[in-house]
């Protein structure tokens, strides 16, 4: 499969990527690198099979983070990227509930007062990571 | 390639390179291994650097309210995970030996490690 992009004069071979994001937005550069890498893949015409947020990386799906105006709110940018490109984004449930990242269903199940996960991401299990590995050409882990 | 080592290469390689406690990395790597096993996806489980401490048989993390990670790794075989590789130099550098480990492993040198990683389609490094 070949796609033509404006910036790239030569046709590229489209690859399907899985990105495993294991670092919180506030701890170092890994989550930001993952975000920029994802954006660049899409710009170049590649396909993102799935984003999988694992360990501290689940904080990237929090819809409750607030940043000073001159700093990037990574979870908000992830959310925009996922929504605009219709990406499959999965947040590991066992990592998430430990860190207070819950969607409305998990909030109900655990009798919590609120949900904290962007609805653009789905709370799911490691099976969805393994499944995505079967359908992709490249896997990259960040953090 | 190490002539004494027989490796059976798999498309997924998990590289455990952190000590068992102090971060969630060891447990998270193990959970991926179990998930892969449930989906019958064979994998290479590679222990490198401080990751070799995960395999020590004498672990007593009760004092820090943790579950012994070595005991969990002992169950790998039950899950059909038998491609367990340990980087020999990582053991030597830490004055550890193979008989201090919880399960049967294949010791590998730098070249074999490089080959395992190079021939894997998916490498997950935690």
Image (tube, rainbow, N blue to C red):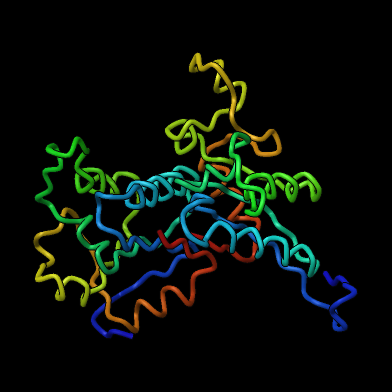
Counting the numbered discs, the total is 0
> Which part of the image, by quadrant, shows the N terminus of chain B?
bottom left
Q: Residue furthest front?
A: A69
Would you place residue B106 above or below residue A98 in this image? below
Q: Residue at x 9, y 60 (%)?
A: B100
Q: Residue at x 62, y 57 (%)?
A: A18
Tell me: B2 left or right of B116: left
Viewer-closest of B116 and B58: B58
Viewer-closest of A116 and A106: A116
| Residue B8 placement (x, y as % from top left) | 38, 69
Q: In the figure, residue A6 lies in which quadrant?
A: bottom right
Tell me: A46 left or right of B20: right
Q: Residue at x 81, y 48 (%)?
A: A84
| Residue A81 placement (x, y as % from top left) | 74, 51
| Residue A115 placement (x, y as % from top left) | 59, 24
Viewer-closest of B118 and A143: A143
Q: In the figure, residue A102 lies in which quadrant?
A: top right
Would you place residue B49 above or below residue A77 in this image? below
| Residue B51 placement (x, y as % from top left) | 27, 61
Would you place residue B41 above or below residue B121 in this image? above
Q: Residue at x 52, y 62 (%)?
A: A29
> Which part of the image, by quadrant, shows the C terminus of chain B?
bottom left
């Amino acid at each position: 499969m070949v796609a033509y992009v404006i910036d790239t004069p030569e046709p590229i071979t489209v690859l399907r990527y899985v990105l495993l994001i294991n670092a919180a937005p506030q701890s170092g550069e890994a989550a930001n690198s993952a975000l920029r890498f994802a954006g660049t893949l899409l710009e170049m015409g590649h396909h993102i099979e799935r984003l999988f947020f694992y360990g501290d990386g689940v904080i990237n799906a929090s819809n409750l983070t607030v940043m000073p105006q001159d700093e990037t709110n990574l979870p908000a940018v992830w959310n925009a990227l996922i929504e605009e490109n219709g990406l499959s984004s999965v947040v590991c449930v066992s990592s998430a509930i430990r860190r207070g990242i819950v969607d409305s269903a998990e909030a109900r199940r655990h009798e919590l007062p609120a949900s904290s996960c962007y609805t653009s991401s789905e709370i799911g299990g490691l099976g969805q990571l393994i499944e995505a590995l079967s359908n992709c050409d490249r896997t990259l882990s960040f953090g | 390639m190490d002539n004494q080592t027989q490796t059976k290469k798999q498309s997924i390689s998990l590289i455990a390179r952190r000590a068992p406690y102090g971060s969630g990395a060891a447990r998270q790597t193990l959970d991926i291994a179990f998930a892969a096993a449930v989906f019958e996806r064979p994998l290479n489980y590679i222990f490198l650097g401080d990751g070799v401490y995960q395999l020590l048989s004498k672990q007593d993390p009760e004092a820090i309210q943790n579950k012994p990670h070595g005991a969990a790794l002992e169950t790998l075989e039950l899950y059909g995970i038998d491609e367990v590789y340990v980087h020999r130099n990582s053991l030597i550098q830490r004055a550890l030996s193979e008989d201090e480990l919880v399960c049967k492993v294949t010791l590998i040198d730098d070249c074999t490690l490089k080959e395992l990683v190079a021939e894997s389609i998916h490498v997950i490094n935690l």
